[in-house]
Amino acid sequence: MQPASSSSHGEVNARRRGDPDPPPPPIPDLSCIDPTCRMEKASRRLHDTAMQLCVLPSRLRKRVRARMLLGFWSEQDKCWKLPEIQFDGPLPLAGLASILQALPAHMRPVDIYRFLTTPQLEFEDEKGRPMTAAEWLRKGRDVEAVIRLIEA
């Protein structure tokens, strides 16, 4: 008589054939439902970005104040942070500064982040699916189309 096993017959047969174990089902990250939390997690430290670009952190802070880059003070990390969405590799997205300056001055960083990461019906990819403003810029599309959407 065979000992009782906690695995199913299918799993046992798969192991005998040399098949790898099936991957576990993905566990959704529900820790970050709040947009501010998502922005915080999807951001890099300003100092790290400055080192990567070989510039002084003060230069990047000036660009944030001039609305050429999106940045925010992280109470959690006690430092300035820059959302990743505004970068294409190490460099800011082409046309980003024009878009940030076209947005209303009273918009909070999280609202700007939400705008950049929300699919817009006005921006479609090759298959007709809505794209975010950040994806639109990353693909080298018309910056003026984003500004027209802001001004509408």
Image (spheres, helix red, strand yellow):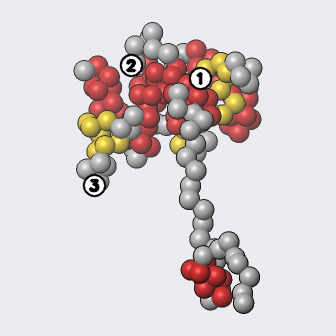
Q: Where is residue 125 in the image (x, y as percent from the top left)?
A: 31, 49
Q: In which quarter of the image is residue 84?
A: top right
Q: Reply above or below: 136 against 69.
A: below
Between 126 and 4, the residue placed more toward the observer is 4
Instruction: Give the SS element for disc 1.
Output: loop
Outermost residue to the top:
106
Q: Can residue 34 be seen in this view?
A: yes
Spatial CA distance of label 2 from label 1 is 16 Å
Spatial CA distance of label 1 from label 3 is 33 Å
Rendered image: mark on residue 102: 2
Q: Residue at x 29, y 32 (%)?
A: 145
Q: Nearer the N terminus, badge 3 or badge 2?
A: 2
The residue under label 1 is which amino acid type? Gly
Q: Where is residue 50 in the image (x, y as percent from the top left)?
A: 70, 31
Residue position marked by numbered label 1 in the rendering: 71
Give the label, 2 or 1, closer to the camera.
Answer: 1
Between 78 and 10, the residue placed more toward the observer is 10
Q: Nearer the N terminus, badge 1 or badge 3?
A: 1
For the N terminus, the quadrant is bottom right
Q: Residue at x 45, y 14 (%)?
A: 107
Give the label, 3 or 2, closer to the camera.
Answer: 3
Spatial CA distance of label 3 from label 2 is 29 Å
Rendered image: mark on residue 107: none
Q: Which residue is drawn at 46% across and 23% down?
A: 112
Q: Reply above or below: 117 against 56.
A: below
Between 56 and 32, the residue placed more toward the observer is 32
Please state if 22 lies on the left or on the right of 97 as rendered.
Answer: right
Q: Label 1: few (<14), some or many (≥20) within 10 Å?
A: many
The residue under label 3 is which amino acid type? Lys
Residue position marked by numbered label 3 in the rendering: 127
